[in-house]
Image (cartoon, grey):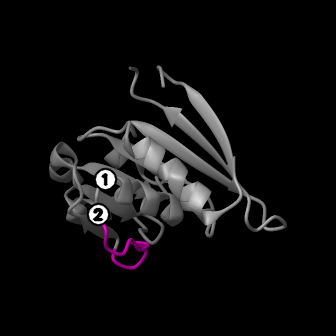
Amino acid sequence: MQENTVQEIVTTTVAETEAVGAALARKVKVGESVALIGQLGAGKTTFSRGFVRELGYEGSVRSPTYTLANRYPSRPPVTHLDLFRLIDPSELIALDLELEQEARILLVEWGDRFEEEWGPASWTVAFDHDPAMPDQRKITIRNNRGV
């Protein structure tokens, strides 16, 4: 992907959504972040599972909604965040993201929240999900890193 390149993909199965995550994992580098944007049930965690498994992690990949951050010892390591429950950007301080981002990849669910405090994201992945078509997702990937 080139500067500000946008790619749109429609998936109809969990495996396809995971495969899109895996494909992006092969492009993202240490120190970069991926903002995952979409409503509840849109596929953010499913995408993240494919992403982290592509980098060699074989364990369970779960939503960080209640833990706020899940750290995976993949290669390279990934920190999977969820900003949905944060009320104030000052809560990000406890997550120590600057230190994290230097040696890891950040996957940030609800990445459009408080982006000024943790961002800007190197990549943006937006999920569009129509409840009338429960298995279908439109995934829009934008390269924001300028290379």
Three-letter amino acid code at the position of disc 1: Leu
Magenta range: 58-67
Q: Tell me: residue 17, above or below residue 10.
A: below
Q: Tell me: residue 57, above or below residue 64.
A: above
Q: Is residue 40 magenta?
A: no
SS state under label 1: loop
Q: Is residue 112 visible?
A: no
Report the residue that reaches farthest toward the right. Answer: 132
In the rendered structure, the answer to whether residue 32 lies left or right of residue 13 reads left
Picture quarter with the C terminus: top left
Estimate the x, y position of residue 109 in percent, counting from the top left. Answer: 46, 59
Query: Separation of disc 1 and disc 2 at Cα?
Result: 6 Å
In this orientation, which residue lies closer to the viewer: 76 or 98? 76
Three-letter amino acid code at the position of disc 2: Tyr
In the rendered structure, the answer to whether residue 42 lies left or right of residue 82 reads right
Estimate the x, y position of residue 94 in percent, counting from the top left. Answer: 21, 65
In the rendered structure, the answer to whether residue 44 lies left or right of residue 86 reads right
In this orientation, which residue lies closer to the viewer: 107 or 93? 107
* Residue at screen point 28% across, 48% down: 105
Q: To which residue does mark 2 refer? A: 57
Q: Is residue 61 magenta?
A: yes
Q: Are marks 1 and 2 in contact (CB under 8 Å)?
A: yes
SS state under label 2: loop
Q: Quadrant of residue 108?
A: bottom left
Main secondary-structure element of the magenta-colored stretch:
loop
Q: To which residue does mark 1 refer? A: 55
Q: Tell me: residue 28, above or below residue 112.
A: above
